[in-house]
Amino acid sequence: MTDHPTVGFDAPRLGRPRALADFKADRRLLMLVAMALVVGTAGTFAAWALVRLIYLVGNLVWFGRVDWTSLSLAHAARTPWMVAIPALGGVVIGLMARYGSEKIRGHGIPEAIEAILIGGSRMSPKVAILKPISSAVSIGTGGPFGAEGPIIMTGGAIGSLFAQCFSLSAAERKVLLVAGAAAGMTAIFGTPVAAVLLAVELLLFEWRPRSFIPVAAAAVTAACWRPMTFGSGPLFPFTATIALPWWGLIACAGVGVVVGLQSGLLTKLLYILEDAFERLPVHWMWRPALGGVVVGLGGLIEPRALGVGYDVIGDLMGASLLSQAVMAILLVKAGIWLVSLSSGTSGGVLAPLLILGGAMGWLVGLVLPGGHGFWAVLGMAAMLGGTMRSPLTGAVFALELTGDYALLAPLLAASTAAYAVTVLLLKRSILTEKIARRGQHITREYAIDPYELARVADVMIAPVDTLPATLTIREAVAEFEAGRHRIYPVVDAAGRPVGLVSRADALRWEQQMDDEGDAGERLADERLADRISDATLPCAHPDDVVARAVEVMIAEDMGRLPVTDPVTGALVGLLTRKTLLKVRAEAVRGEAEREAFYGAGAAG
């Protein structure tokens, strides 16, 4: 038996313990930042290539010219060809999905979330290639989508593929996947802060330096490249000066409530239509073509509802639209977007949400003071905050899009109100509902891990019943036959643990004694110390954080962990799986139990 049988968290096979600190960052963070710079650059140019490809497809099929510059479908000819083009685009997407990869279907963000939470942040090269091509075909042929969802998926795939070239953990791959997504969003919209907030609120499922800093680095990298690729300045400049009355912020919150209800309705309708498509007696490959027919018919009513619609967003902020036109855009865009997306085609949701929320805000603004553009901007922020359940992203996104920082308080009021409406009315968002239908549950509430706050001394069993190391095997078997405990720590003369003995050990020894005759008698007289002494027995100390002890238990596959005095090494307690539940139980009670300390509800 060694002089120091317990080694705590310094066991060689466990590695040295992490020092307790506010954050868990280490020098690998610098490596991730360097990688994020590469991913941010690649994501930016992927975004540029995707946008140019959309313009090329659009100009080619609608106007018969090879042109990489932007286009508007407002003046597209209303002929039968307007119905045929989106339908043919749907056929191409269906074929690509069936014979390429089904993951290109949809708007990309749920697929990115699924890869992060379920797939170990691994995406395939096939998705990185087919997703932007299918999106370019979908949007270029009139699909009422934006490019941001596909580029989030494509940027994420680039980050994931780059990460898979190195020996990284799943958590580190996730960081680079999200870095690519944030870079793509920044490149298209010029919104680096909103891209980072979207990453935190929607994709990372954590807020740690390890993830936040590299993602921010990728977004800033994209912002540096953006003047060369997309130009500088806000995408939709807006500098109208609005003098709100004293009740103005209340009105802003009211607009958020209205748009929140609109968001909830759109979410419900989307999945009602998706269920209807599932019931159709046709292979899913042909559903995008059926959706394309509806898109084309909508285009005959209002051509401006087709395509990305950035020109429509700009007009909603200005004064160039009539109320009848806004109403037509709202109804047609909503209808063809819902049908097309539910059919399983490829395209993003941010730009359509901006248009739908902006149109609703514009119409509500008819009865409110101030210009229509002001309320349209609030509607856009509210729609993002409510639909994507990302209120900070919605507010800051609209702020960076317009460049008008005087809008911050109204944007926050509207976005938060819409968020409140949707989280109270709907169990899941438009993004997570799709994942839930695939059998996966996602929770998007962040909280401090209670195991990081509790100390081992608060939950350990103390005092502990032990067996002396000098006990014979026969005596140890007798202790177990008494039936008090299933496992005992074994301690030396100084009270230091040298191992753990279980009921299974006692049964095995008893069987050996019965089977071996005289040899069994000799076994019965052996000391426990000769059987179980372990010079590297892991242990915890009373002042250790419970989370660290849990990590040791997981690493060693132990259901019980001795707790020793850090100076003497003497056993002072025992940590078990059952005692760990006490930490969780306290957290649950803190959430559920209610009491008043002052006033009528307080106890006397």
Image (cartoon, grey):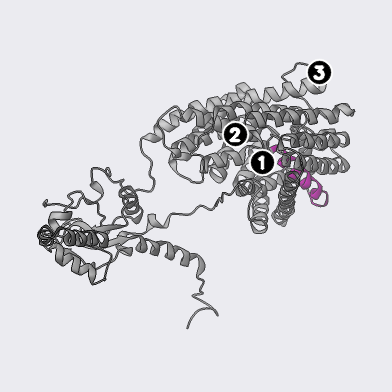
Give the CA separation, mark 1 to mark 3. Answer: 35 Å
Question: Residue 417 at x, y = what percent?
Answer: 67, 54
Q: Amino acid at mark 3?
A: Gly
Name the side, left or right, on which 33 lies relative to 574.
right
Q: Secondary structure at mark 3?
A: loop
Give percent across and percent down for residue 2.
11, 51
**Circle number at residue 64:** 3
Q: Which mark is residue 398?
A: 1
Against 261, residue 58 (above or below) is above
Q: Which mark lies nearer to you, 2 or 1? A: 2
Q: Quadrant of residue 280?
A: top right
* Disc number for residue 462: none
Across and down, in percent, residue 345 comes to 71, 35
Q: Earlier in the sequence, mark 1 or mark 3?
A: 3
Q: Which residue is mark 2?
A: 153
Nearer to the camera, 405 or 49: 49
- Give the quadrant of residue 249: bottom right
Q: In the image, is residue 33 part of the stretch drawn in magenta?
A: no
Inspect the image, locate mark 1, and give the three-letter code of the amino acid beneath it.
Ala
**Callout 1 environment at 10 Å: few (<14), some (14 to 19), or many (20+)?**
many
In-image side of 426 versus 165 (left or right) = right
Farthest bottom residue in view: 604
Q: Nearer the viewer, residue 419 or 205?
A: 205
